[in-house]
Amino acid sequence: MSDLQLSLIVLALIAIGAVWLFNALVERRRRKVFEQRFRPKSSGAPAMGAEAAPLGRVKTQDRSEPSFNDDALADDDETMAASKDLDVVRASSSAGRVDDPEAAPHVVIDDAIHAVVTLEPEGQISGERALSLLHAFRHAGRQPVMLVGVRGDLQEPLRAGQRYDAVLVAVQLANRSGPLNEIEWSEFVAALAHVAEQFPATCEIPDMRETTARARALDALCVPLDAQIGINLASVQSGWTGQQVADHAREQGLILRPDGRFHALDERGATLVVLQNGDGGAFRADTLDAQHTSRLTLLLDVPRAPENSEPFERMLVLAHKLAALLDATLVDDQSRVLTLNALASIGRQIEPVYEKLAEAGMPAGSPRALALFG
């Protein structure tokens, strides 16, 4: 081997070594920056019964007439522990966050039912840029997400025309579709981490195991309180057109909404009871004449209807008035006639549900209950 060849080999080895060393330094620097930006944190929020088993919830449309029994209302140790935790306001909560939804209904983040990821940009970020980067982050799997901008001590829904010191991404932990799970959380956080690099911003992420444990415990707390009451109106004759139903419903003050149901509202605009097509299908304002049904259902969604508005009493009044106007019979889901005694018994069994909702820190019709039972 000549001296020239030996020199070329040595130079090649030196070049390879230099490239390897350069790549190693770059990778080390990238890893250090990543760790600084995406450091996990303990959420500090109530654990709410971390050992509670995951429980799914029955979908709303599958539960028009629940049965009430002692087992459904029995106290479970972990669930009651979660209930107590639900009422605890974190000492570290920043200004503008509260756990009493009725005390400040304009507050958008409820630490008891949200996991909050904090994005802290290197400098202030405009609402326009933040919205453009986060427009796809409205859901984490089956759970809704809120985007909140922080300006000093003020928190508000993220909006254009403002500049923010930080952005809070609040993921709801549970709703009627079930609890936030590990896959939903990990996929959401991974996507959010990529966007945080584009801000650029540091990203404080609650621990996954603690977050999903909170979600399961919250869902387990809600499941036995998720009650809906249905009263059916069965036609004595040949049924009714959609227009007939609409005319009589409007006479009673009900409003047809885009969900295809007639809503009975209280003085604040909250839905107390809905009237829906018992034969299936939605009522549409432009096709009422063409629609026909022989069965209607009045539905009371207990956690979503404020107790002080007496929704069950309103439901009974509507049921009897509509039955008289439409020549209908009040029946249960098995088409058995509902007597006055049977209806009174149902009313008595609703009362403990309202009490337990209040004890659990989610009074019926409150923003927290509307979120969890949505």
Image: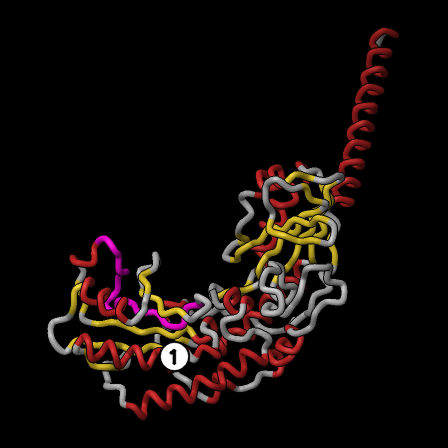
- Which of 71/301 is in front? 301
Left or right, 227 with respect to 331, comes to right
Please say whether residue 134 is one of the residues in the magenta stretch: no
Q: Is residue 194 visible?
A: no
Tell me if residue 209 comes above or below residue 120 in the rendering. Answer: below
**Which residue does the numbered mark 1 point to in the structure image?**
66
Q: Can you name the residue that lies furthest to the left here?
A: 238
- Please state the horizontal and vertical placement of residue 363, each as a whole percent of the image: 54, 75
Callout 1 amino acid: Pro
- Please state the horizontal and vertical placement of residue 10, each as a whole percent of the image: 85, 16
Left or right, 218 with respect to 280, comes to right
- Residue at 73% over, 62% down: 93
Q: What's the magenta region?
A: 270-286
- Residue at 58% over, 64% down: 105
Tell me if residue 10 comes above or below residue 78 in the rendering. Answer: above
Please say whether residue 282 is one of the residues in the magenta stretch: yes
- Which of 187/301 is in front? 301
- Residue at 69% over, 57% down: 206
- Please state the horizontal and vertical placement of residue 264, each as a whole percent of the image: 36, 70
Residue at disc 1, secondary structure: loop
Where residue 192 sits, quadrant-wise, is top right
Q: Is residue 86 visible?
A: yes
Question: Which quarter shows the N terminus?
Answer: top right
- Please state the horizontal and vertical placement of residue 43, each as a whole percent of the image: 71, 61
Near mark 1 (Cα within 10 A), the count class, few <14, some 14-19 or many ≥20, is few
- Residue at 53% over, 70% down: 366
